């Protein structure tokens, strides 16, 4: 096979891998937004916290990675539940910007706490994915990225299925469409809010462990969440399919941009894409277009 | 309702200071501002100048976010544009200080209009995220247009000099920065006595209704963006003269969040809110520093804990104010004033 083409395929595969992680993080945004109409910027910090929790359980307590991983995800979920009950519930019905700023403040608190507990310097997670490379045909793929891709793909498919067939998923969709109507049909709307936050934050924490396994953890790794935010804005804030397609597409584009233009172009391409997408479809490629009435 | 303030004209009703005590307090406040540099030592003067710069920037953001309802998380980028313009004009053209500063404001305003263009189509959070995107793109430009911006190392700005007097000490800089801030804040207060300011408020309260009432939305939203960016540009220009170096890292996204936090803590949609918030948020880390020094004998390596504790307190202030005091410090000030209006006859 032609060398250039092979190189291109390898880059694209790596891009798809990081795109899957983006999609997974975007899923956390979408879940929380769908249920509570809150854009939770703290998803980025929950992601970071997931990585650190895994670090604490696996390296600090010396647990096996397969015990530490569920514990880290559980930790993210518990945090999500506490935040929803403590901070978001009292703010419901307020101006969306205020709720958004609450999550920004929460993110700052989480970063500070992580620095207080674990220190500011970057750390690497104990290896739990083997490092032997994987070959797809002739193309080389890092095993970590392949694992991340498979995990993200499976998780998103599970969520898509849950939303279609599980009662709880349908309750969440009903709540997203019309809260008052969902209430009168006997759906426990506050319960749906809690579940969405718990599941969303648990997803983010899981994505954080995967991201940390690939690139190490630091208190500033929440920046990754900004890219995921671009994914949800482009894909549509309330669309899981949009998160999946947007995440994979952005991963590919970022990978191409950093290889062929240079690493420093990644953010400008990402955010340029965001602005273009917003000008064309302000509600996202797959989002619901809400008509505003007086 | 205050008794004994019967107004006979709209002019009197719209005045900034309506009662005698207000005028007295304002006079005392201004006298304090004049007296400050003779009382404070160099470190506190440094803080006073920093507070003044932040007050200008926060007031600008308050016009945009608090009064027009357009959330911007890119305000720091406009400050950077102002700072770079001033630094470039000072080092390359050598034009006088005041022209540089105004140019900084105007260039920032032009960028503000450009960034504000999507504001007709996207609203609320989407707009906030569009401004984040714009600030990242500007940051990229600051690093890569190194013919103008000096690349990653930035530009060093020579000390400010007016009429041949070099203003290198904080004592002298104070006399430039504080009056400019006072004028800017006065300008903002007066803006909301005019049609333009009231149109901004109408747009914040319901933009479609405002359009029905005959306010051209795009024009006024862009006007709001340009005025806010002008304030940011002026603040950035002062910042450039104050710190004497401008780099792409001088104005991170954190600064934008800081300014938004300042107006949330201070009170959105009140001029005094921008002032109080900027003062409070600039001085709170200093108070923390004193607190940490105080407990340092008890806690080992308290110095190392300072930065994370600051981050936690910063976030906690935002969350706490939004949940418990959504109107911010401005509301607390109002409450104190109401209490003392009848004091000591009612507790």
Image (cartoon, rainbow, N blue to C red):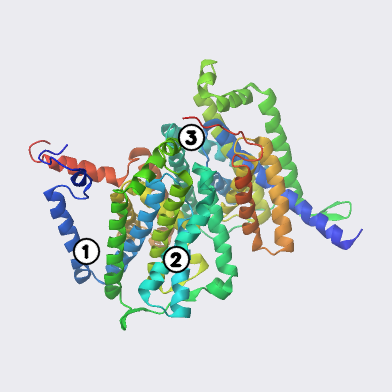
Residue on which the image places disc 3: A84
Quadrant of the rendered structure where residue A258 is?
A: bottom right
- Residue at 63% in and 50% down: A276
Mark 3: secondary structure: helix
- Which mark, by number, is residue B33? 1
**Regarding mark 1 in the picture, which secondary structure is present there?**
helix
Percent of width and height locating residue B20: 11, 50
Residue occupying the point 60% across, 69% down: B144
Separation of disc 1 and disc 3 at Cα?
44 Å
* Same chain for the residues under marks 3 and 2 in the image: no
Q: Looking at the rendering, in which quadrant would you find the C terminus of chain B?
A: top left
The answer to whether residue A63 is seen in the rendering is no
Residue A235 at what x, y percent from top left? 65, 41
**Residue A109 appears at what percent x and percent y?**
45, 48
- Would you say A136 lies left or right of A114 here? right
- Give the residue at the far right of this rendering: A1
Q: Few, some or many C-alpha atoms within 10 Å of disc 3 (few <14, some 14-19, many ≥20)?
A: many
For the residues labelled 1 and 2, the Cα–Cα distance comes to: 26 Å
Q: Which is more toward the observer, B1 or B319?
A: B1
| Mark 1 vs mark 3: in front | 1
Using the image, determine if residue B217 lies above or below residue A265: above
Position of residue A235 relative to residue B137, above or below, is above
Number of marks present in the image shown:
3
């Amino acid at each position: 096979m032609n060398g250039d083409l092979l190189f291109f395929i390898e880059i694209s595969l790596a891009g798809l891998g990081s795109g899957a992680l983006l999609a997974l993080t975007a899923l956390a945004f979408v879940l929380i937004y769908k249920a509570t109409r809150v854009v939770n910027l703290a998803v980025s910090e929950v992601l970071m916290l997931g990585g650190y929790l895994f670090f604490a359980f696996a390296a600090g307590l010396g647990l096996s990675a397969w015990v530490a991983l569920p514990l880290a995800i559980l930790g993210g979920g518990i945090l999500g539940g506490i935040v929803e009950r403590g901070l978001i519930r009292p703010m419901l019905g307020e101006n969306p910007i205020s709720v958004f700023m609450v999550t920004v403040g929460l993110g700052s608190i989480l970063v500070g706490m992580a620095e207080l507990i674990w220190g500011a310097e970057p750390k690497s997670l104990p290896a739990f994915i083997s490092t032997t490379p994987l070959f797809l045909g002739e193309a080389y793929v890092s095993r970590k990225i392949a694992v991340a891709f498979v995990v993200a793909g499976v998780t998103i498919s599970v969520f898509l299925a849950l939303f279609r067939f599980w009662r709880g998923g349908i309750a969440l969709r009903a709540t997203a469409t019309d809260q008052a109507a969902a209430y009168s049909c006997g759906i426990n709307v506050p319960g749906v809010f809690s579940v969405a936050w718990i599941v969303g934050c648990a997803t983010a924490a899981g994505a954080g462990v995967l991201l940390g396994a690939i690139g190490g953890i630091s208190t500033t790794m929440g920046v990754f969440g900004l890219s995921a935010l671009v994914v949800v804005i482009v894909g549509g804030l309330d669309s899981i399919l949009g998160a999946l397609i947007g995440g994979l597409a952005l991963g590919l584009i970022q990978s191409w941009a950093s290889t062929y233009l240079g690493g420093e172009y990644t953010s400008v391409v990402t955010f340029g894409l965001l602005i273009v997408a917003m000008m064309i479809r302000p509600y996202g490629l797959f989002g619901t277009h809400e008509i505003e009435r007086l | 309702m205050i008794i004994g303030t019967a107004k006979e004209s709209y002019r009197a009703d719209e005045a900034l200071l309506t009662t005698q005590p207000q005028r007295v307090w304002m006079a005392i406040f201004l006298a304090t501002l004049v007296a400050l540099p003779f009382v404070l030592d160099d470190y506190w003067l440094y803080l006073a100048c920093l507070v003044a710069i932040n007050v200008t920037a926060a007031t600008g953001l308050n016009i945009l976010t608090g009064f027009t309802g357009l959330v911007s998380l890119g305000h720091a980028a406009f400050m950077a544009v102002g700072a770079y313009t001033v630094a470039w004009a000072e080092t390359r053209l050598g034009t006088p200080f005041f022209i540089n500063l105004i140019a900084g404001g105007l260039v920032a305003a032009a960028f503000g209009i450009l960034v504000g263009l999507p504001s007709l189509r996207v609203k609320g959070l989407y707009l906030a995220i569009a401004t984040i995107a714009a600030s990242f793109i500007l940051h990229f430009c600051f690093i890569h247009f190194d013919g103008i911006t000096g690349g990653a190392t930035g530009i060093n700005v020579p000390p400010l000099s007016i009429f041949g007097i070099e203003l290198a000490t904080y004592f002298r800089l104070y006399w430039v920065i504080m009056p400019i801030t006072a004028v800017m804040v006065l300008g903002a207060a007066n803006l909301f006595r005019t049609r333009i300011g009231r149109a901004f408020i109408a747009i914040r309260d319901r933009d479609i209704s405002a359009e029905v009432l005959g306010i051209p939305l795009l024009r006024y939203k862009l006007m709001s963006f340009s005025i806010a960016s002008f304030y940011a540009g002026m603040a950035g220009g002062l910042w450039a003269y104050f710190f004497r170096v401008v780099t792409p890292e001088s104005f991170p996204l954190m600064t934008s969040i800081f300014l938004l936090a300042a107006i949330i803590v201070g009170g959105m949609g009140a001029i005094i809110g921008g002032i109080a918030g900027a003062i409070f948020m600039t001085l709170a880390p200093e108070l923390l520093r004193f607190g940490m020094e105080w407990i340092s004998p008890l806690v080992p390596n308290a110095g190392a804990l300072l930065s994370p504790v600051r981050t936690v307190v910063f976030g906690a202030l935002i969350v706490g104010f939004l949940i418990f005091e959504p109107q911010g410090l401005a509301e607390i000030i109002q409450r104190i004033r109401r209490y003392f209006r009848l004091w000591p006859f009612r507790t």
